[in-house]
Image (cartoon, coloured by chain):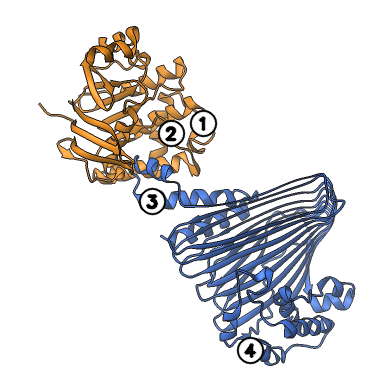
Chain colours: A blue, B orange
Amino acid sequence: MSGFAEKLGALAGGLPQDAATPLRQAGLAAFRRHGLPHKRLEDWKFTGLGDLDRNDWRLAANDATPFGTLPPDASLKPLAEAVAGEPGLLDLLMPETTASAAMAALNAGLLRNAWLLDIAPGAQLSQPITLAHRGVAGQLENITLFMRLGQGAQASLLESHQGAGWYNGVLRLRLAQNAVLEHARLQTGGKDAYHTALLDVHLAQGARYRHASLLAGAGLARHEMQVCLAGEAAEADISGLALPRGDGHLDHSLRLEHAAAHCRSAQLFKNAVDEAGHAVFQGRIRVAPGAQRTDAQQLCRTLLLSDEAQVDTKPELEILADDVSCSHGATVGDLDAGMLFYMQARGIPAETARRLLLQGFAEEITQALEDDALRAPFADAVAHGLGSAA
Amino acid sequence: MSTILEIRNLHATVDGKAILNGIDLTIRPGEVHAIMGPNGSGKSTLSYVLSGRDGYEVTDGDILLDGQSLLGLPAEDRAREGLFLAFQYPVEIPGVANAVFLRSAVNAVRRHRGQPELDAMSFLKTAKARMKQLQMDEKFLQRPVNVGFSGGEKKRNEVFQMLMLEPRMMILDETDSGLDIDALKIVAEGVNALRGPERSALVITHYQRLLDYIVPDFVHVLAKGRIVKSGGKELALELEAKGYGDILGEAA
């Protein structure tokens, strides 16, 4: 058992007894068994969390909802209260008990700042829902969110993570039939911040989900995504941009499952790694037996901008249906010398040319967002992330 | 008499291979010179050597712009000193809008000249006027640099940049390739509009056609990295009529 797991008793001591207690018990038991994930686990091959052991953490005593002002079509309640009224939720929220899912187990084990947000069927939200967290040094912020979009509902979600400390979060999204969600996620924490997050998305028939993630801060961040296209004709566009610098370690890990026929998914991940930064992209696509006419594409492009910069990419395809169109690709390179020369031949200073090319590289991820209200803050955060690098 | 560009005994190598073998050329203010030559004669290498591309090594000789040696200056400084290369193959830059790219360039040049930078409004005003002159759609300002442009649109975009940057020395590398006759005329009008007593041009071309519209004062024939024959504009017509074989035969 790791040192961290030994300290857990103290962390978990002050937690309430309520309808969510079975989740806490199951989560703590699983986490105690496995401890912090380490590089000997296949899913964590490139990212170990051993550093977390070396710090003393206190659980943030913050029970305020991370959501901003909500529209009338959205209803928010504490998760324990929701579970009390709808016991079936327990099954949906129960963490996996494998070693590689230990962080989600820990999240369940320390469940306290936890919320259920329901968007009414057919709702068309005109403003994005905002979800903001700013961490404090020395504190573990453990947030658990469950968000459901009713049939045909359409919404945008702007999620942001800043500050210091350690964030360990789980966000589960359930999109009912034909629901549409566009989700931008900005992680721009300070260089001492740790960030471990699980995003779990489940799409019913005809549901459409669009996600763009920016990892542009934190000493160590892992944004783990699992997306299940569970109903026919569901669509998922998942993209991410990681900008590690200093000795930052930024990890996008995605498991995407085509469980139903006639679904489409596209993954586009980009890394621009500078100084002694380290980027990780793991992308697994599984096409279940019977998921015919699946269209699943994956592309990861990386720029290594210094001699010390590192990237690890691991694409995995498991295709158990025969009528599918799947592709994956990965490229690693430096900024294009021809483009740099072209800009310099117009008088643009080399540093400016580099910055413009990096912005151009990032632009494709920004443009993946369709909602202006998400794209503008995403573009600002990208510009800031690249600017601080120069 | 003053000169804008002076090339003295220029020798250059690419990957250790000698491509330019002693070029001498003097271009005075207001003059338009054409360099013609068969494929592989060193035309494009000359344009890259002049503009300062990495990998093109000058092994002997000198290049002077307004009496100042350009050797040792990076490409960006040469551009700010007033050298402009219109590329044979303009580069596509995904994700960077034409307007952002060009405004960065214009302001870099203006700062160098001690002029105030153009704000977004005055930049757009000037840019739109120049585009009109070249019959370019304004939508090209917001599109990524050269991405998805046709061959003709790319060349027009080169001349557009040139009109915006108002260089002292224009170098046009095969600007006619890929252009139909109408586009060729528009591009030539753009270049001619810039002609004046304080500005010179070096037009590099394989074919005589462009020189019907940008009429040169002098024509030089390049072969195996050297100028083997020089003359007036009639030399271009002679080349067109006889082909390179005869001229090179005479010169040998």
Give the image location of residue B51, x and y in percent: 30, 37
Quadrant in the rendering for residue A141: bottom right
- Residue type at mark 4: give it: Gly
Q: Mark 3 points at which residue?
A: A352
What label does residue A3 carry, if any? 4
Q: Which chain carries label 1?
A: B
Q: Which residue is drawn at 52% across and 36% down?
A: B147
- Measured in 3D between alpha carbons, the distance from the residue under mark 1 to the one under mark 2, in whole angstroms, is 10 Å
Secondary-structure class at tag 3? helix
Query: Farthest residue in the top direction?
Result: B241
Badge 3 vs badge 4, beta-carbon distance below 8 Å: no
Residue B22 horizontal side relative to residue A268, left or right: left
Quadrant in the rendering for residue A97: bottom right
Looking at the rendered image, the disc whose residue lies closer to the viewer, 1 or 4, is: 4
Q: Mark 2 points at which residue?
A: B90
Res. A121 visible in picture: no
In the image, A276 versus B166, the foreground residue is A276
Badge 1 vs badge 2, beta-carbon distance below 8 Å: yes
| Badge 1 density bin: few <14, some 14–19, many ≥20, Cα 10 Å | some
Give the image location of residue A291, x and y in percent: 84, 50
Residue A30 horizontal side relative to residue B21, left or right: right
